[in-house]
Amino acid sequence: MLQTTERGLYCSAADVYIDPWLPVERAIITHAHGDHARWGSRHYLASREGGRVLRTRLGADANIELVDFGESRNINGVSISLVPAGHILGSAQVRLEHNGDVWVVSGDYKTEPDPTCSAFEPVRCNTFITESTFGLPIYRWCAQEETFAGMRAWWAENAALGRASLVYAYALGKAQRVLAGMLDAGIGPIYTHGAVERLTIDYRKSGVALHPTSAVVAQPRGTTYAGSLIVAPPSAAGSTWLRRFGDLSTAFASGWMQVRGARRRRSLDKGFVLSDHVDWPALIDTISATGAERVWVTHGYREQVVRFLRDKGLDAHSMASHWEGEDEQGPAVADEEAIA
Amino acid sequence: MKRFAQLYSAIDSTTSTNRKVDAMAEYFASAAPADAAWAVYFLSGGRPKRLIGVRRVAEWAMAESGVPPWLFEECYHAVGDLAETIALLLPDHVAPHALLPRPLHDWVENVLLPLGNMSEDEQRQAVLNAWRQLDGTERFVWNKLITGSFRVGVSGQLVVRALARASNIDEGVIAHRLSGHWTPTAESFSALIEPDSSDADRSRPFPFYLAYALEGELESLGNPAQWQAEWKWDGIRSQVIRRDGQTYIWTRGGELATDRFPEIVAAANALPDGTVLDGEIMPWMNGAAMPFAQLQRRIGRKKLGPRILAEVPIVLIAYDLLELEGRDMRAAPLTVRRAALANICQCDDGRPERVSRHERSEGPALLLSPIITLQTWSDARAAHAGSRDHRAEGLMLKRLDSEYGVGRRKGSWWKWKVQPFSVDAVMIYAQPGHGRRALLHTDYTFAVRDGDALVPFAKAYSGLTDTEIRELDAWIRRHTIEKFGPVRHVEPVHVFELHFEGIQHSPRHKSGVAVRFPRIARWRTDKTASEADTIETLRTLLEAAK
């Protein structure tokens, strides 16, 4: 039903692409991260839940059609519907059914609960196309409550020393998850980088409860940040933008922080393990929950996951894509986009 | 163990030296002496001799976590650290253990050290038990300890500073008490931080005084008449101690090496009691230094047979006197120490090539480091330019009034190394690094041109900025021709200027040469692979270095 082409993952029966990396006529978008939602296509189909953030990302002129989760569209005899993927606000899996054959494209996903988006739903299918960003057994996430408790303790310790705390978190998704995790933490206003603030407003307008924020850019000159918490995208690291904060402790919220070398390389004071992707056990469990007899594995540790699944007797294949993952770019650029 | 693991995390999670020292000082001030003693031992780089085969530990971890060997290998490549890979893979505890927490010294003395004398099966049981009793960071630290790979970003000097901060005792006193064969027991830890104990263990060396690399112009040092220059020898920095009728040789690495250098022991036995010399152990023949590789060859031998002793004779080139007739001379000015040194070596300082009284057929084993007198800074420049003719790495510049300090201090001693050798080479292989550089390709192999072929001749790990490493890493992933395990054969495109300290003929290398301390000086983005240096360049350097 699906095949990879130079423009992206293509369904010829319905003549649609899923998260194409080049402009096409009709694109179904799993979520608004830049490596999945690219500019230039004529027509986009996406989830209603993520409508606002996708609009912010694709611009006012994009032709976007929104559907509810579970609502199905019939295109040339292919029944297409979106199912929550639990990755970020509005993230969806794409379910395609044609003559009784069911395919599901996971997009990026996680199975942990996340108050900023609808929870992942496993879908039974014949073929499952899964991501594998953290497809090694060293990646097992600790309970997120533990991570948030650690973050609060870190902030409190810095605040007691009159120091500001800055968390690097990807501007779309991770930043808002941090803000939700800090609700009722007794922290004053949380300051945000402009890129974070814009999307945070979209989240609030979409009905997600987040800790109050205030954009750094809106603060008067001479504002002191001692004792405050700041959320900024990883790209702000090492920039002169940081100078205004004075004595500062820095941390990064990402699944990559599971590995000590990744923390140390960035010269961070803290690494908080917080991922919007499935960890290894959830990846393997999810694949078996779909009941799929065939699995395509994309971006991440796909060769390793394919080998593991084949050893378990599954018909697994590696699928090259332009969605970003360690094998193409490595966690060195993990700060950006979907990987965070 | 929990507290020690917390200390490890505290040190590991900050880049600030001061915060590291604070964390250690807090630990030393509050931990039980028996635990603090082991913390001192491990933090200053102490390692119990081979306890357990690393391979075995990995196999038990695979069995315990149910991860097949190939997947374990993949995980190891991603993490770049075996102890951490194992800690990340081991299953979580089913139920929180209700066992009494065991302190560090208990773990070390009753579990870790006995491992070395156990059968494989007993070892396995002991290690599995430990894993089941420890969690998170404790497991990681434990794995580091049993595999002998415990390292955290502190130097022995920082441990000394932390001990001084915790005990309010002078750093120099602590360093002196710690040097030599310090044993990690509660008693010796208490003695270490005791306000006053004139306890001198007679074998103990003084902490070595280290020089910084000269940064600015020579002229910034002021009047050349206030300085003396000596060759910077490329040997093993050592102290030779003569006390109570015994001789001890300590290397700067903290190793008691008396047995390795019988020639020096024979010469030192003639020194008066209460003498400590500081100098360089050098391979020396016919009145001249031999290449460092010869010394390495000799150190590599387990047994010193008559043949190696004849092929690679050793001398001590003495350059300082730290103790005279049992008195600590370190606070005396260099000129005074030097005069006493010349006197004790029984030679006239004006004739540095003269010999000690212990004559051998190969010549004396105790030499006095020649002084290069400086009238002007041009004299220093001229001497510096001729360093390689003496097989020296450059010059040492010491202020005539300088005392013999503790550790590395700026100001009165400088090392001024000669320009390294330099070659433009092509990167052909890359593999991921370890520790801080795990997940990134940071270990590179470089080649020179030989006709149309590329001949690998050096590996280098350092010299690029973090930004360059990331850029190169992304490029490597996209331009891999072939993979051999973790090693990627990449397109021969990028040229780097490599620096190295020495070059030697080597039949074991494809290129026929081995280079010493290769590192990347810069990324030559202005050059293409066809403009890289050739094997001929290396051969010319080899000729010149002979």
Image (cartoon, rainbow, N blue to C red):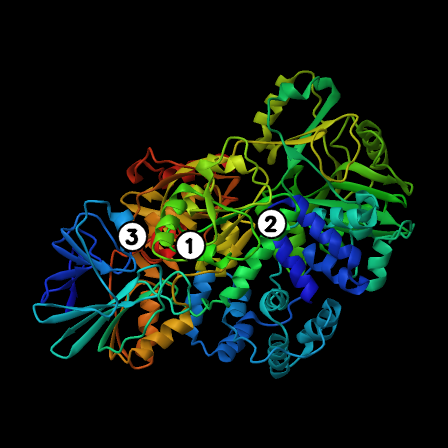
Residue B80 appears in the rendering: no
| Residue B179 pos. (x, y %) | 78, 51
> In the rendered structure, which amino acid carries the disc numbered 1?
Gln
Name the one closer to the observer, A116 or B205.
Answer: A116
Residue picked out by circle 1: A176
Q: Residues within 10 Å of mark 1 (few under 14, many from 20)?
A: many
| Residue B527 pos. (x, y %) | 32, 35
Q: Residue furthest left?
A: A76
Gap between marks 1 and 2, in whole Å? Answer: 27 Å
Q: Residue at x 57, y 56 (%)?
A: A152
Name the one closer to the observer, A41 or A63.
Answer: A63
Q: Nearer the viewer, mark 1 or mark 2?
A: 1
> In the rendered structure, which amino acid carries the disc numbered 3?
Arg
Q: Chain of mark 3?
A: A
| Residue A252 pos. (x, y %) | 49, 52
Residue B454 appears in the rendering: yes
Q: Residue at x 84, y 53 (%)?
A: B193
Residue picked out by circle 3: A52
Q: Residue furthest bottom?
A: B121
Seen in the image, is B380 located left or right of residue A181?
right
> In the rendered structure, which amino acid carries the disc numbered 2?
Thr
Seen in the image, is B119 located left or right of residue A211?
right
- Element at badge 1? helix
| Residue B92 pos. (x, y %) | 54, 75
Figure quadrant of residue B172? top right
Dot 1 or dot 3, earlier in sequence: 3
Answer yes or no: are tags 1 and 3 on the same subunit.
yes
Gap between marks 1 and 3, in whole Å? Answer: 14 Å
Q: Residue at x 74, y 53 (%)?
A: B26
Residue picked out by circle 2: B14
Q: Residue at x 37, y 77 (%)?
A: A285
Q: Do residues under tags 1 and 2 come within 8 Å of each other at their CB atoms?
A: no
